[in-house]
Image (cartoon, coloured by chain):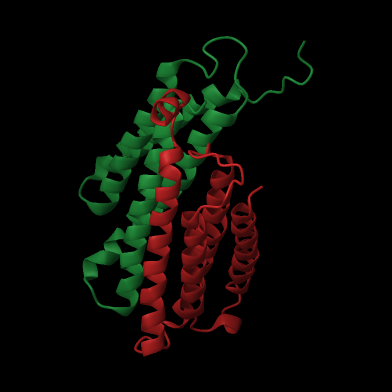
Amino acid sequence: MMPSQSIWMIRSALLYLILSVSIGTVILLQKVIDLHPFIWALLPAHYEMAIWGWIVQLAMGTAYWMFPKKLDDPRRGPNWAGWAVFILFNMGLIFLVISTLFQSLIYAAVFGRGLLLISILIFAVLMWQRIVTYRNHH
Amino acid sequence: MPTTTRWFIKSGVFYFILGITLAFLAEFPSLTGNLSLLPIYWHMLVMGWITQLIIGVSVWMFPRKHRDKKKRESILVWSAFWTLNIGLILRFLSEPFIPILEDHQIIKTSIILSALLQWIAVLLYTIEIWPRLQNRKKSRRSKA
């Protein structure tokens, strides 16, 4: 069964895919049609959303769902920890994207990357306990 | 493994090889001249390889909403495959020449078409995969 945390991480990843490709579409069009010079300023947001929002978040959501579960409850680790990963990761990414658009917000990038770091540390602890095999378990 | 998955992954492997080859060639400016290769090999790796691998595997592994016996391939998935790949081919054939042939009508048309096709492909894939993201309780409720 796909857990709610994975469902939300994968849904968020799909939204970031659409956002990133939409911005990429406009940037590509800007190369042949002079739409607006501001469009080039969207380039860092385009790749931050593609890498973190789409690829990394989808991998995290899928791993949280599919990796071997623990034998004791809670089988995917504490429920709140899975939600913390989703919420901190997405808050961090929003701050990171905002920081690429508004250069004056110098602390937004630090705060955003800090939240991403905390969420990935929690994720690593959760997943570390599930990188196991039960082949020889009796 | 469904047919669509195999097509997505094989196409992905093709772009993976092509992307890393271009990245290697880009190290020799005497060979590539004024061609703009950086965005080409990045998009070959991120859209052509990683995204197609993700799409292929998710279409295969994510729980299906309608489990018919033939496991017929969704029209949406095939449409996503062709729109994405035609879009990528058009892009990779025309984008390197933008610095040289910026005002050429064929380049402009090809870039516009490629941008729209890639965008449509992503929407089609999302429409296919979004309803599959359900936990068991909800999917039972929606079948009842």
The percent coordinates of residue A111 (x first, y second) are 31, 36
In the image, A31 versus B7, the foreground residue is B7
Left or right of A105: which side holds B65? right
The percent coordinates of residue A50 (x first, y second) are 42, 51
Q: Is residue B3 above or below residue B111?
A: above
**Which residue occupies 59% across, 45% down?**
B60
Counting labels gives 0
Report which quarter residue B23 is drawn in: bottom right
The percent coordinates of residue A64 (x first, y second) are 52, 29
The percent coordinates of residue A13 (x first, y second) are 41, 43
Left or right of A30: which side holds A80? right
Q: Is residue B10 above or below residue A70?
A: below
Q: Is residue A123 above or below residue B81?
A: above
Q: Is residue B24 above or below residue A20?
A: below
Residue A48 appearing in the image: no
**Which residue occupies 36% across, 62% down?**
A24
In the image, B63 versus A80, the foreground residue is B63
Left or right of A98: which side holds B63? right
Residue B53 appearing in the image: yes
**Which residue occupies 48% across, 34% down?**
A61
Report the chain shown in green.
Answer: A
Give chain B's shade.
Answer: red
- Which part of the image, by quadrant, shows the C terminus of chain B? top left
